[in-house]
Amino acid sequence: MPSPGHLRPLFAAAGIFLAAAASAAAVFAGSVFAGAPQRVVSISLCTDQLAMLVAAPGQLVSVTYLAVDPGSSPMVEEARAFHINHGFAEEVALLRPDLVLAGRYTTRVTVDMLIRLGHPVEIFEPENSIEDIRTNLRKMGAALGREARAEELIALMDRDLDAIATALPETRPEVAFYYASGYSLGTGTLADAIATRAGLENIAPRLDLGASGVVPLEALILARPGVVVRSAGYRGHSRAQEILNHPALQHFLEPPRRDARSGPEWVCGTPLVTDAIRALARAAGQELRE
């Protein structure tokens, strides 16, 4: 679980608590941000989170339903202060946005329709590294007229990353990611960046895995990583997840091997990734000297 002690300072400074959101519209309309977009709608989970962290009070009007899903978002309570949308062009248009925030893989039909209706759309690339997080924070800051806020968040994140790096021991245990259907993550992914910052070595190159791919259970066991990261799981059951309960895997994950779990902080690249890094380091047995 994320550490509230590290999450809350970011939220507190973001101006997105319920009380602030309730009184923000009147303040914002006549503020120094009058030249910036004043009715911003996000239709992507990752832009939801970036916008909630960067936007001025009252500037962000709506976020997606995924932002209030605890399995996908680490900002559920904050997201409940906003109107919830399902990413349909018709419902977004009714909100009269002067800026729509979307991801590269947001449904193209929706994006094209919003553009045809005359709504400006800013598209964000996925975050696959810490540098990508910095890039998208700056892009969000520029889009919302909140450059100073974006730089503040970057400074907070970098300070936290430096603190983690200083606190890590010199050992670098090997780690493997193992999700439903044997899906694994390699280099050039946000998960790999989290593992590296947590002082771990991803075994993906040893398995000839690129950015991602399927790893047979036998190959995982033979590779003998000291840490295995699995997803926290979702409600319900699927055949794809059966591999995660295989007796051979359960036996393999017995101590002293470490069984770690990824969480909602892993889904999108935001400053909250530092909580994922800390949690993984501790789950892997890395004693942080903080």
Image (tube, rainbow, N blue to C red):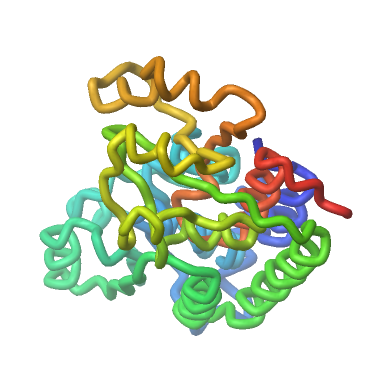
In this rendering, position of residue 134 left or right of residue 39: right
Closer to the camera, 286 or 248?
248
From the viewer's perspective, is 128 left or right of 130?
left
Farthest residue to the right: give it.
290
Specify whether residue 171 is in view: yes
Please state if 127 lies on the left or on the right of 134 as rendered.
Answer: left
Residue 262 location (% of width, % of height): 52, 40
The image position of residue 222, as x and y in percent, is 41, 38
> Which of the two residues, 52 or 127, is positioned nearer the viewer here?
127
Q: What is the residue that sits farthest to the front in this orientation?
A: 222
Q: Residue 58 occupies which quadrant of the picture?
A: bottom right
Q: Where is 96 relative to 63, above or below?
A: below
Quadrant housing the C terminus: bottom right
Write the residue at 27% across / 33% down: 181
Tell me if I can see residue 26 in this picture: no
The residue at the point 53 percent across, 48 percent down is 175
User: Could you say where residue 108 lies in the image, as x and y percent from the top left?
Assistant: 15, 62
- In which image quadrant can residue 39 be found? bottom left
Q: Quadrant of residue 32?
A: bottom right
Position of residue 130 relative to residue 288, above or below, is below
User: 22 or 110, which is in the foreground?
Assistant: 110
Going 76% across and 61% down the picture, which residue do you hit? 170
